[in-house]
Amino acid sequence: MIFNKIYFFSLVILILPNLIVSEPLELTDKTWKDMLCGQWMVEFYAPWCPSCQYFKPIWHDFSKAMISKEIKVAAIDINEYPSLSGRFRISVLPTIYYVRDGVFRQYNGERSLDRLKNYIEFQEWQRTEPVSSYFAPDSFSMSLISSIFDISVLVKDAYTFLQDRYGWPAWLIYVFFTVAVILIGLILGFGVLMIIDYCVTGTVKDDVNIILDDSKDVEDLDDSDSQKLLKPRKQKKTTVSLPTRITSSTPQRTTTIKNRSSPVIEIQDDEALLNEVLAADQDDNDDSEGLNASDIPPGTDDEDQTTTTNVSMRQRRINK
């Protein structure tokens, strides 16, 4: 008797975990992120789908077979949670995803128990291309699509509520939704324009105010000051060429003065002084040629040297 009781309890302990865990886990729009950790096989189905009804016992058997493989098997009803159908891009039922540490791969093999087992046991999932990060269910773009599906569900629920609770006809509900959409669009458009006007054209307005302030400062100036400010500044370059012809043994020279502050009159005076000195020197040479050596009084050589020295000093001073 005691032996039979021990056998019965041990049998219950062995079978009870299988009865509890063998059923696929039900995920919702609140708990679907649990599949981002570990290994999961997730089926998307609908109660009205004949293929899903045919595949249901196979999926249960697969769930039992995966208990020892540490792979969690789950199912999601898209009729109950339509936002998940948009997030996972469900277009065919049933759709199966293999998830490993947040990386999604869609199973496209045969819907049979053996092929499902081989997909896991022989790691055939490695030959399946993972879903792009842009279209991953946890990406921003797919979250936005899921929000759109949620809005559609809200509109559907509102339609049902107005028709069942208040008895509104269908055409009145459609008119109400149309007016509501137009008003929401106008409010959103006006808000976007206000944001653009504040962020973009605000800097332009500030620049215009600065220009107006500068114009007021210019009006406060005198006429002479404003003319000085508005008058363009030009750099003048003065180039004066002074050709100097010398009849003596000195070669011809051309003097070019650029950007010099001395006036032209001073240059002409220096040229006249040089011509006078050279003319006096020429006259002295002519007089010395007409005289004899005896006619030259003593001390003439010293005077010639002095005159020549004075001329050279004057030429140096003029050249400087």
Image (cartoon, helix red, strand yellow):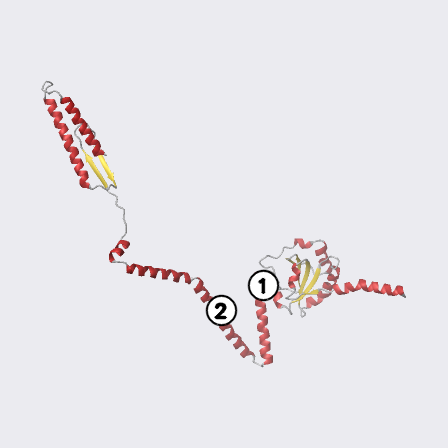
Quarter holding residue 17 = bottom right
Quarter holding residue 239 = top left
Q: Which residue is mark 2?
A: 188
Which element carries disc 1, helix, strand or loop? Answer: helix
Check whether the beta carbons of the residues at disc 2 and disc 1 lie within 8 A of each other: no
Q: Is residue 279 left or right of residue 31?
A: left
Percent coordinates x, y for residue 276 in the rendering: 14, 32
Q: Foreground: 303 or 33?
A: 303
Percent coordinates x, y for residue 234 in the rendering: 27, 48
Q: Which residue is mark 1?
A: 143
Residue reaching furthest to the right: 1
Q: Foreground: 263 or 4?
A: 263
Name the quadrant of the C terminus. top left
Q: Is residue 283 above or below residue 130?
A: above
Name the N-terminal-most of marks 2 and 1. Answer: 1
User: What mark, if any, has residue 77 been given in the picture?
Assistant: none
Q: Foreground: 263 or 159?
A: 263
Percent coordinates x, y for residue 223 in the rendering: 25, 58
Kindly report the distance in space between the C-alpha atoms of the residues bearing marks 2 and 1. 21 Å
Residue at 62% x, 65% y: name it: 84
Callout 2 amino acid: Leu
Q: Is residue 281 left or right of residue 211?
A: left
Give the crowd class for mark 2: few <14, some 14-19, many >=20 residues within 10 Å: few
